[in-house]
C-alpha cells in the first residue's frame, strides 16, 4: 500500500544487479525529501499501479570521472525479482520514496 504523498524523490540515472549477492542497485541522487533504510522505492507502471521494493541499504559512492557524490540504493532480492527489475530497465527517471509498501 502506497503512502498518499512521497517522503522523497530519487532521481535514478542507472540500475544494475549483482546476482551472486542477490542484490539490485539504483544509483544517483535524492532530489527531494529524504530516504531511509526499510522505506520503499515505487516503480510506476501507470497512474494507478506501482511496484514497491524495500530499500535494504543506502550507500554514498564516488566515481573517478566525477567530483559529485552519488547515492546508491541497495535492494535484497531473489533471482525472480532481479529478472523482473532488470527487465524494467530502470534508469533516467524520478521515483517516489514512501514509508509504506509491500515486499
Image (tube, grey):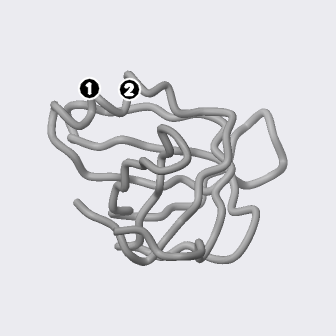
Q: Is residue 32 above or below residue 42?
A: below
Q: Label 2 crowding class (10 Å Cα cut-off): few <14, some 14-19, many 20+?
A: some
Q: Position of residue 97 (x, y in %)?
A: 53, 65
- Identify the mark at residue 86; answer none if there is no mark: 2
User: Which image quarter holds the N terminus?
Assistant: bottom left
| Occupied quadrant, residue 88 | top left
Q: Position of residue 84 (x, y in %)?
A: 29, 29
Q: Nearer the viewer, residue 85 or 4?
A: 4
Q: Position of residue 8 (x, y in %)?
A: 63, 70
Relative side of 67 to 73, left or right: right
Which residue is pictured at 42% across the width and 68% down the height? 2
> In what element is the residue under mark 2?
helix
Q: Are marks 2 and 1 in contact (CB under 8 Å)?
A: yes
Q: Is residue 20 above or below residue 35?
A: above
Q: Label 1 crowding class (10 Å Cα cut-off): few <14, some 14-19, many 20+?
A: some
Identify residue for label 1: 83
Relative side of 71 to 87, left or right: right
Q: Position of residue 50 (x, y in %)?
A: 42, 49
Q: Is residue 12 above or below residue 90?
A: below
- All told, the count of numbered labels is 2
Amino acid at each position: 500500500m502506497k503512502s498518499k504523498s512521497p517522503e522523497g524523490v530519487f532521481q535514478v540515472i542507472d540500475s544494475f544487479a549483482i546476482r551472486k549477492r542477490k542484490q539490485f542497485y539504483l544509483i544517483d541522487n535524492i532530489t527531494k525529501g529524504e530516504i531511509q533504510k526499510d522505506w520503499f522505492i515505487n516503480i510506476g507502471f501507470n497512474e494507478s499501479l506501482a511496484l514497491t521494493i524495500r530499500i535494504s541499504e543506502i550507500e554514498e559512492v564516488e566515481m573517478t570521472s566525477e567530483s559529485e557524490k552519488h547515492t546508491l540504493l541497495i535492494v535484497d532480492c531473489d533471482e525472480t525479482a532481479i529478472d523482473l527489475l532488470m527487465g524494467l530497465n530502470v534508469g533516467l527517471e524520478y521515483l517516489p520514496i514512501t514509508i509504506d509498501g509491500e515486499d
